[in-house]
Amino acid sequence: MKITIIGAGPGGYETALEAAKKGIEVTLVSSGPVGGTCLNEGCIPTKALLRSAEVFETVKEAASYGVSAGEPSLDFAACMARKDAVVEQLRSGVEFLLKNKLITLLRGKASLLGGKSVKVALDEGGEVTVDSDYIIVATGSVSASLPIPGADLPGVITSKEMLSLEELPKSVCVIGAGVIGLEMASMLNSFGCSVSVLEYCPDILPRFDTDLAKRLKQILSKRGIKIETSAQVTSIEDTPEGLVTKYTRKEAECSVTAEKVLMAVGRRPNLASLELEEAGIAATPRGVVVDQYMQTSVPGIYAIGDITGGYMLAHVATFQGRRALNHILAGCPSEGPVDDIRLDVVPAAVFTRPEAACVGLTEDECKAGGIPVKVHKSFFRACGKAVAMGETDGFCKIVASEADGRILGCHLFGPHASDIIQEAAALITRGATVSDLQDTIHAHPTLTEVLLSAAGA
Ligand code: NAD
């Protein structure tokens, strides 16, 4: 069996490795470095820089832990060099794994020719056509922008450019208080940059639990990040004082002046140059249309990850790839399950300081869906490990069905929320109840006890 996979991000390369393990011959086409957005210009470089920001903050607070370290200073170039080294180390790891005799890595741009043929314009020059039994499209997404005057000014940048700046800007105006906007705002603030955030919706992180978003906004504001919600950005102008971002809020005309403007208003599926129409694949501007098996409107052609426009998360792309592969291995049935993966139970994390994370339904979603729920809440200030760490901001909220105690959602913010959420994801995936959680011994003292306390509340 032969599969062609277009795109070598966490959707494409993980699926290629998994397919090769099953003895399938894979042609993997990559138009950029392997690892995609996540490894090269997204999750990994951001987390590497956030770690520098965390160390800087911790050293500043050292005296409160009884450690004298003097006044720390930040070497931004060294932070960036460390970030590059982290990315390089992981990228070479992926390249090594892909040196598999069943995987042929083609570097170039792929387009669909119809049937199961893919044309690849090779980076080294020339063109090849690859024929296979199945195709998996995993070309990811690109940053979205706003159709406003000044959006294309040189100082208006995306997260990709932010991650490769040579100098730390003195001030940044972030448009969008979603995941990218807040992670960047938190990092820049820790580095000592003056940060303003403008969000169109009434709350930050519109897809998160509203209590969580409100408390996180208070904490980030206390740290000195200026956050304006219900702000409609109208234009950006280049002036001698810097970039002036104009916005309306409650009918008032307002503005923020900053050295750089970070556009963080979402991402859109990367449909360009694939020639989807040529292959007869249905797509909307929101992404390629797929069924429960990740199969497009053309049998045997699958789409996974950001290009399908759902949750734009690396781990979702990876698991969608597994679903597609499982469907192929099961002989492409037209109905019935092909695995036990719950693609609707998606843990997500925001790496601000403190972190926020969620999985499953929010209280508001349950209300809107007419599901009666009981909400169980606990606070990090009552968790021994959090107090010992000196990181007591945050809470844990478990949303459970009132009828049978089944856990439907978990919403956290506080230290290591991104790690703690995984336990809730496992519980929800396996249909566990609040009493199942209460009956599970949790090691003491650990941050995961915040879940156990919530279950008992
Ligand atoms: P997002 O959808 O999370 O947030 C975009 C924000 O911009 C929203 O809050 C939206 O209301 C706001 N917005 C939209 N138009 C606006 C306007 N005109 N003025 C002001 N605000 C406006 O998108 P993102 O933060 O750009 O991230 C893109 C994708 O990447 C998301 O799907 C995200 O989940 C993913 N991502 C994930 C992680 C992570 O898992 N930690 C990190 C970074 C990015």
Image (cartoon, rainbow, N blue to C red):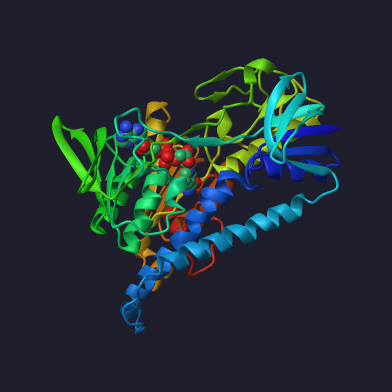
One can see residue 206 in this view: no
Q: Closer to the camera, 334 or 57?
A: 57
Query: In the image, is residue 328 above or below residue 362?
Result: above
One can see residue 395 in this view: yes
Please tell me which residue is depicted at 84% across the width and 44% down the height of the picture: 102
Query: In the image, is residue 159 above or below residue 344?
Result: below
Q: State left or right for residue 219 relative to residue 144.
A: left
Give residue 343's position: percent from left, percent from top: 60, 35
The quadrant holding residue 93 is bottom right
Quadrant where the image shows the N terminus: top right
Give residue 97's position: percent from left, percent from top: 75, 53
Q: State left or right for residue 400 relative to residue 227.
A: right
Please tell me which residue is depicted at 56% across the width and 34% down the height of the picture: 306
Give residue 346's position: percent from left, percent from top: 54, 41
Q: Closer to the camera, 288 or 254?
A: 254
Quadrant assignment for ligand 1: top left
Residue lying at the far left of the rendered structure: 252
Please tell me which residue is depicted at 34% across the width and 84% down the height of the picture: 68
Q: Closer to the camera, 199 or 72?
A: 72
Residue lying at the far front of the rendered structure: 125
Give residue 377's position: percent from left, percent from top: 37, 51
Q: Closer to the camera, 219 or 257?
A: 257
Query: In the image, is residue 284 above or below residue 234?
Result: above
